[in-house]
Image: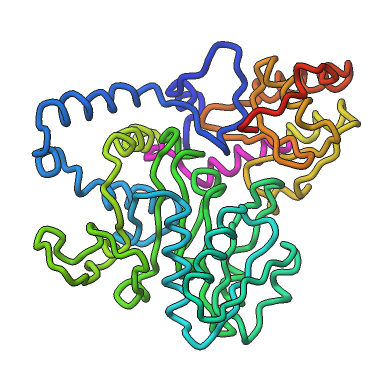
Amino acid sequence: MTDFATTKAMFQLSKGMIYLDGNSLGPLPKATAARVEQAVTAEWGEKVITGWNRAGWMAQPTELGDRIGRLIGAEPGHVVLGDTLSIKVYQALAAAIDLVPDRKVILTDSGNFPSDIYMAEGLIKSLGRGHELRVVAPEDVENHINDDLAVLMLTQVDYRTGRLHDMADLTAKAHAVGAIASWDLAHTAGAMAVDLKGCNADFAVGCTYKYLNAGPGAPAFIYVAPRHIDSCQPALSGWLGHEAPFAFDLDYRPGTGIERMRVGTPPVLQMAALDASLDIWDQVDMDALRTASIALTEQFIAGVEARCPELTLASPRDPQQRGSQVSFAFAHGYAAMQACIARNVIGDFRAPDIMRFGFCPLFIDAGDVDAAIDVIADVMGNQLWDDPAYTQVARVT
C-alpha cells in the first residue's frame, strides 16, 4: 500500500498552494534539482561526450521506458522515450495505417486533444492515398467501428471533461472488424492503472510532463505491441532508429524491436528529471492510487455542488467513467479560474467554459480538497471573479 503522506513530502510546492493542475504540468519533485545538477556537472561537465557511454545516456530511452511500462501495463522492452507527443502520435498512426493498407478510414472523436487530430490531418495530406479522418462524438465511437475502419485513434481520457473510454472494450471491437487500435495516454499515465497488454492495445503514446512530473519540455513515449514490433515501419527514419547508427550507412534499416521507434537525440537533461520522478513512481501501487483519486474527486464534486450552484458538472458523475480530473462549466469560467489562482488554488481553463481541476494523491489530500472548496465557494458566492483583472486572457490558459 502506498503511503501518500510520504509521497506528498517528496514534492516542492509553495506554502499555501493547492495545486490541482498536475494533469497539465506536474509539480517538481524535491530530488529533481540534484539529479539534474548531477547530469549537468558530473556527467556532462566531467564526462563530456563520453557520457553517452560512461553515464548511460544512450540507454536511457529504453531503461526509463521500462519503468513507465510498469505503470501502463506494457511488456518489458516495448516502450521507448524521446521526442514530443505529437511526433509519437504521428509515428503510431503512420505505422498503424501501414498494417492495414487496404483500408482508408481513421476514426477518432471530438474529445481527442486537437493536436492529435492535427497530426492525423497532416499525415493524411502527406500520404495522399485517400485516407479519411472521421471525427465523431465520444459517445458515438462504438457505432462507427465497422468493416471500413483502418485505425481507431483515441485519447483514453478526454482532456476537457475527464470522460474515460473503455480501452479493452473498444480495442476488442476494433480488432473484431480487422482494425488497429492506437491510444493516447496523455491524461491516463500516472493517473490510473492501465493494462496495455491485457487490453490487447496495438499502439500507445503518452507524455511525461503531466502526472509523471518530469517537467516542462519532458519527453514523450511510444508503445508498440510485441506482435507488431518487427513488422511495423517507422515513418520517421531518424538516426537513432537505425539498426546501426554509428555505421553511418546511407540506407536506412530499422532498428531491432522498440529501438526502431527512436528518432532524435535523447533529451538527457529532461530524462534526468524523469529519472528522479520515477524514483517516486517506482513506489506507487497504481490500484491504490486510483482508489485514492476517486475518493478525492468524489469529495470535491460533492463539496462544490453543495456550495456552488452556479457551476455545472461537466465530467461524468460515475467515477468509473472518468479519469483523475473534474471539470465544471461556467459562463465566466476563465475569470473564475483566474480568481481561484489568485487565491492559490491552481487549476486551469479550457475553452469555451470549462474550469478544470486535476487530482493526484501523491501530493493532494482530503484537507487540500476541503480548502480548495472553501476558496471556490468564496469566489463564486461573492462573485469575486467579476473583476476586470481576471478577464485579460493570457497566452496560456
Percent position (x, y) of residue 150? 55, 79
For image coordinates 46% across by 47% down, the residue present is: 207
Q: Is residue 231 visible?
A: yes
Colouring style: rainbow
Magenta segment: does it hold 316? no
Query: Measuring 25% from the left and 61% from the top, which residue is drawn there?
Result: 241
Asked whether 297 falls inside the magenta stretch, the response is yes
Q: Which of the 4 quarters of the picture holds residue 224?
A: bottom left
Q: Residue shown at 50%/48% (left/top)?
A: 189
Relative to 299, residue 180 above or below: below
Q: Is residue 56 left or right of residue 389?
A: left
| Residue found farthest to the top | 15
Q: Which residues are magenta?
A: 281-298
Q: Does the magenta stretch mainly form a helix, a strand or a loop?
A: helix
Q: Nearer the viewer, residue 173 or 118?
A: 118
Q: Note whether 269 is above or below 285 in the view shown.
A: above
Q: Which of the pair 313/333 is nearer the observer?
A: 333
60 in relation to 1, above or below: below
Task: Please give the count of numbered marks on the rendered protein.
Answer: 0
Q: Position of residue 342 (x, y in %)?
A: 69, 16
Residue 175 in sight: no
Locate residue 1, reporting x and y percent. Answer: 47, 38
The foreground one among 358 and 101 is 101
- The quadrant of the image that shows the C terminus is top right
Where is 245 relative to 18, above or below?
below
What residue is drawn where x is 48% and y is 66%? 198
Residue 295 position, x and y percent, is 67, 37
Left or right: 271, with 318 as reference point = left
